[in-house]
Image (cartoon, helix red, strand yellow):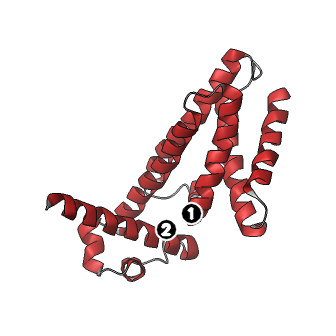
Amino acid sequence: MTDGRTRRREDTRQRLFVAAVELIAERGFSATTVDDIAARAGVAKGTVYYNFESKTVLFEELLRHGIGLLTADFRAAVAGLPPRAALAALVRAELEYICRYRAFAQLLLSEMWRTNREWQQTLRLLRGEAIEVIAETVRAGVASGDLPADLDVRTASSALFGVGLVVAVDWLVFQPDRPIEDVQEALLGIVRRVAQA
């Protein structure tokens, strides 16, 4: 009985996450109401408040959920790989993630520029967790000699994360017919040039 209830609650929360992401990506946070989210998810307004204390709490949990999935994808992609292969795997993982969660990627990209939000500290911490997976790979590359010894690991890791996000959103919006392999190779070309500079 409890497992069925837990599964239903998780399914409902997932529907609310999807509805909130889509609406906030389309309209912005301020223009999206709890009524809108409930209607898009196909649930009663009370269901939103049963699962989340407020729209802000829902959004903060949404950030945790979405960036948590990306961080998990990054960790799975690099597991057991040497640094150069791990960098390629990170690029591919980010592109695939953004293909699956396009609205969330657009939302994340826009929210990273806003510094006056209640959840900015949460976003900063979560973004840091995802970037740390990249940084571990870059540090391993510096240690192995695959990457330049004087490479600024933090900046390189942030750049790789940000460039991947921006390029992927640009690709999906303006060049959606371009194969993922082409985009991946173009991004890897940039990474290789930076690594050799």
Toward which corner of the image does residue 27 lie, by quadrant?
bottom right
Going by the numbered disc 1, the residue's amino acid type is Leu
- Residue 68 image offset from top left, x and y in percent: 46, 48
Residue 89 versus residue 60 in the image, above or below: above
Marks 1 and 2 in Cβ contact (< 8 Å):
yes
Report the quarter where the C terminus lies.
top right
Judge by depth and name the residue closer to the eye, 28 or 102.
102
Percent coordinates x, y for residue 180 in the rendering: 73, 55
| Marker count (numbered) | 2
Is residue 21 shown above or below 189?
below
- Whether residue 16 sits left or right of residue 22 in the image: it is left
Label 1 neighbour load within 10 Å: few <14, some 14-19, many 20+: many
Q: Quadrant for residue 7, please give it.
A: bottom left
Query: Residue 32 in the image: x percent, y percent?
Result: 46, 77
Q: Would residue 53 appear left or right of 24 to someone viewing this image?
A: left
Would residue 109 be visible to someone looking at this image?
no
User: Which residue shows up at 23% across the image and 60% down it?
Assistant: 6
Residue under label 1: 107
Reading the image, the residue beneath label 2 is 21
Instruction: Name the residue at 71% across, 64% down.
Output: 172
Identified by mark 2, the residue type is Val
